[in-house]
Image (tube, coloured by chain):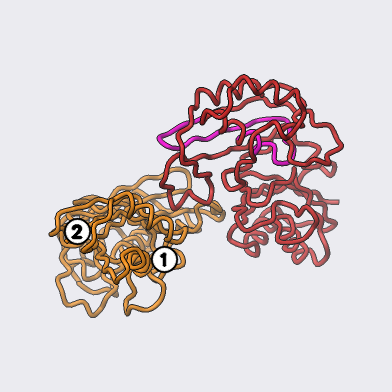
Chain colours: A red, B orange
C-alpha cells in the first residue's frame, strides 16, 4: 500500500472548512478527494492533520492518503495542481512509510492570527486579516498571553460545548510581531481545540483594548467555562502556518 | 469648486481596467463614479492619472474629481470605503487646489511586474504574479534593460497601433529584485504607453530565457515596429505602485 504525505495551501474564504462539521457543503478535503478519485479511478480517503474552521486559511496544512496504485510524487503534484481550483494548491508531495498518519504523527502546530488596526485595510490583505478599528495595547496582550503558556485545560477556550475528550493542551509559545498598524500573533502548541486560537485571540483583544485585565487569564482558565473567555475572533484573520512532525 | 485627490488600491482581476476602451463593462473608474454620484446626489466625473489595462492591479493609483458641495476628507474616505466593493479601496483623500489635474500633474509613475519562476505558485500570490515555468537569467535581462533607460521613441513597445500622439517617453530606472523563485521588475518613467510595461516585460523575458540577445534592444527601439518586440506579458503580474507629483 502506498502512502503519500501532501502539504497544502488554501484561501479558505469560500469553504466550509477543511472538513464539514456534518459533511455538507464545499470543503478543502472534499475538493482534494474528488481530484485524487479522478486520478485513481476510485474513491480515495484523505486524512488531514486536523480540521480548520470555515473561512480559515492555510499555508502549510498536511494530509496523507493511502492508495494501492503507485504514482510518482511529481505526477501527483502536477495532477492535483492542474485540477484543483485556484484557491487550493499542493506545494509538496512525499511518499512516506505506510504507517504515517498526518493527525496522530503531528507533534506541534503553528497558527498565525493577523489583526489590522485602523480604518483602512489593504485590498490585497483584507481577506486574510481582521480589521479592528481601535489601537491595541500589545504590552498588555503579551502579559495576558504569558498566563496561557504551558499545559492547561483549555475548556474555557473551546467552541465545542459537547466535547467529551480531554481539553488539556500545551502552548509552547505565543509571539507578537507589530509593524505599523499590523499585528501578527503566532501560536505554537501541541494541538488546538475547536475555535481555540480564535477564542484566545478574541480574549487577548479584549485585554488589548482595556475591557479586561491581563490578570483575569488564570481565573478564566480555572473556571473551565467558555462564557468567561472573550469572543471568537473572525476566521478570516487566521492561518495555519505549519504542522511539525 | 472643490477638488479632491484620491489614492486608490485595487485588485484588477475582475475589471475591464481603470476605464473601458469603449466605455462598456465593469471598470474601476465606473465603480468610483457610481459611489460618488450616490454621495453627491448627482453625476461626478473622476479623472484618473492614467488607464490601467484589464486585469492590472494598483497599490497607488491617483485620481481627482471636482464637486460643488463641500465634504470633509474623512467623510469622503469612509463613504467610498463603505460602498465600494471589497476589491477597491480608497487609502487617502486630500482636498487640493482647484487646478490640480491627476493626469497632467503626474511627473513619474512606478510600475512593478512580478514573475514567479517554477511549477508551483503560492495560493495567496497567484492572482498577482505571472507564473513562468522556466528559470530566467536575470543578468541578461539587466543588460537588455540598460538599453531602455533614457528618452526613446517606444512605438515598438506600444499595444495601440492607431496611436497618433508622440510615443517618446523617458524611463529613469528599471530595477530587478530576485528572491528565491520570485523576480520583481520595477519600472520608473515619466509615462507609459498602452501595454508598454507588459511588452517591455515580455521582451525582457525572451532575453532572460535565451530566445533573444540583450544587444537586440537598440534595434527593436529604432525599428519603431511593434512586431519586432516580444510578447505582451499577462496583465495579472502588473501593479501600478505609485504616481509621483
Residue A195, quarter of picture: top right
The residues colored magenta run A177-201
Task: Classify 10 Å Cα crowding around label 2: few (below 14), some (14-19), many (20 and above).
Answer: some
How far across and down, in percent of the image, does residue B188 sit?
A: 24, 52
How far across and down, in percent of the image, does residue B180 sit?
A: 47, 43
Q: Chain of mark 2?
A: B
Task: Classify 10 Å Cα crowding around label 1: few (below 14), some (14-19), many (20 and above).
Answer: many
User: Which numbered circle lies on residue B2?
Assistant: 2
Residue lying at 43% horizontally and 60% vertically, measured from the top left: B83
A84 or B8, nearer to the observer = B8
Residue A28, quarter of picture: bottom right
Q: Is residue A160 left or right of residue B209?
A: right
Q: Is residue B16 left or right of residue A194?
A: left
A124 or A67, nearer to the observer = A124
Residue that mark 1 sits on: B55
Q: Chain of mark 1?
A: B
Residue lying at 62% horizontally and 19% vertically, measured from the top left: A215
How far across and down, in percent of the image, does residue A123 sit?
A: 44, 53
Amino acid at each position: 500500500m502506498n502512502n503519500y504525505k501532501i502539504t497544502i495551501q488554501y484561501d479558505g474564504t469560500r469553504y466550509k472548512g477543511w472538513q464539514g462539521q456534518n459533511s455538507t457543503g464545499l470543503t478543502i478535503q472534499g475538493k482534494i478527494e474528488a481530484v485524487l478519485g479522478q486520478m485513481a479511478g476510485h474513491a480515495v480517503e484523505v486524512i488531514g492533520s486536523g480540521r480548520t474552521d470555515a473561512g480559515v486559511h492555510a499555508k502549510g496544512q498536511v494530509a496523507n492518503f493511502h492508495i494501492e496504485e503507485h504514482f510518482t510524487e511529481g505526477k501527483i503534484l502536477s495532477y492535483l495542481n492542474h485540477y484543483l481550483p485556484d484557491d487550493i494548491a499542493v506545494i509538496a508531495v512525499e511518499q512516506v512509510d505506510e504507517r504515517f498518519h498526518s493527525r496522530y504523527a503531528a507533534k506541534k502546530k503553528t497558527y498565525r492570527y493577523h489583526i489590522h488596526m485602523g480604518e483602512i485595510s489593504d485590498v490585497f490583505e483584507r481577506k486574510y486579516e481582521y480589521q479592528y478599528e481601535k489601537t491595541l495595547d500589545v504590552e498588555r496582550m503579551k502579559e495576558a498571553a504569558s498566563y496561557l503558556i504551558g499545559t492547561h485545560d483549555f475548556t474555557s477556550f473551546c467552541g465545542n460545548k459537547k466535547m467529551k475528550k480531554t481539553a488539556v493542551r500545551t502552548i509552547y509559545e505565543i509571539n507578537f510581531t507589530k509593524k505599523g498598524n499590523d499585528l501578527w500573533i503566532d501560536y505554537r502548541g501541541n494541538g488546538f481545540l475547536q475555535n481555540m486560537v480564535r477564542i484566545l485571540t478574541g480574549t487577548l483583544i479584549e485585554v488589548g483594548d482595556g475591557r479586561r485585565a491581563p490578570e483575569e487569564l488564570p481565573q478564566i482558565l480555572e473556571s473551565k467555562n467558555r462564557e468567561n473567555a472573550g469572543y471568537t475572533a473572525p476566521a478570516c484573520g487566521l492561518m495555519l502556518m505549519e504542522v511539525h512532525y
